[in-house]
Amino acid sequence: MGPKKGVISQSVKDVVQSLVDDDLVLKDKIGTSVYFWSLPSCAGNQLRTTYSKLESDLSNSKKRYMELVEQRDNLKRGREDSDEREDALEELKAVELRHKKLKEELAAYADSDPSALEAMKDATEVAHSAANRWTDNIFTLQQWCSSTFPQAKEQLEHMYREVGITEDFEYLQ
């Protein structure tokens, strides 16, 4: 009957589905058929449930508000403006300023820190052993090239000079 009157069946399905999504209409599949229904008491129950939920949220919010107001008042009690409080705040600022200056001074002397010096010594030893290891690798490579390509001795010597390996190239002491 719907298509004869100009109603599109897909729009009816969309409207019914939106009502189901909004919990205004209930749906149930029985066998191969899907049934939709809405009872007046269901809408009333939904409204009562929503109302009670909102009422409980409101009471919880009011209770939380009162707790926060009481907490604020408790925190304000010890913070009334007085000469003693102002003196304590000035002393706090002075101590914080001194702490900042001492930290800056400590940072200035960080280069002389024994642990930093020890770390530099360790790093120097590691770098020294690495440099000697690479020097050994270079000498090994030179020996291999000389034994593998004896006819190219002059070209190899020229290449060594180009990359900075001269006659005075030695291990670090």
Image (cartoon, rainbow, N blue to C red):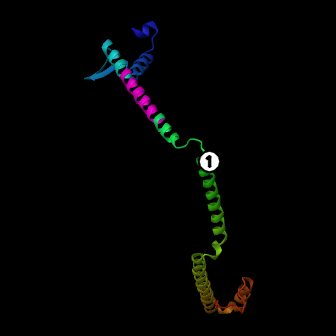
Q: Which span is picked out in magenta?
A: 51-68
Residue 37 found in image quarter: top left
Residue located farthest toward the top when viewing the structure as drawn: 5
Q: Position of residue 11 (x, y in %)?
A: 45, 17
Amino acid type, residue under disc 1 in the picture? Glu
Task: Judge from the rendering whether residue 136 lies leftward or rightward of residue 75; answer left or right.
Answer: right
Q: Please report the residue visible at 40 percent of the width from the left and 30 percent of the height from the top.
A: 60
Q: Write down the residue under mark 1.
A: 86
163 shown above or below 7: below
Q: Residue drawn at (49%, 37%), measured in percent from left and top? A: 73
Task: State the residue lying farthest toward the front.
Answer: 83
Task: Name the image quarter holding residue 31.
Answer: top left
> Per the image, is 62 magenta?
yes
Q: Residue at x 60, y 78 (%)?
A: 117
Whether the magenta-drawn stretch holds residue 165 is answered as no
Q: Quadrant of the C terminus?
A: bottom right
Q: Work out whether residue 100 or residue 61 is closer to the camera in this orientation and state it.
A: 100
Structural crowding at the residue carrying mark 1, measured as other residues with C-alpha within 10 Å and reported as few (<14), some (14–19) or many (≥20): few
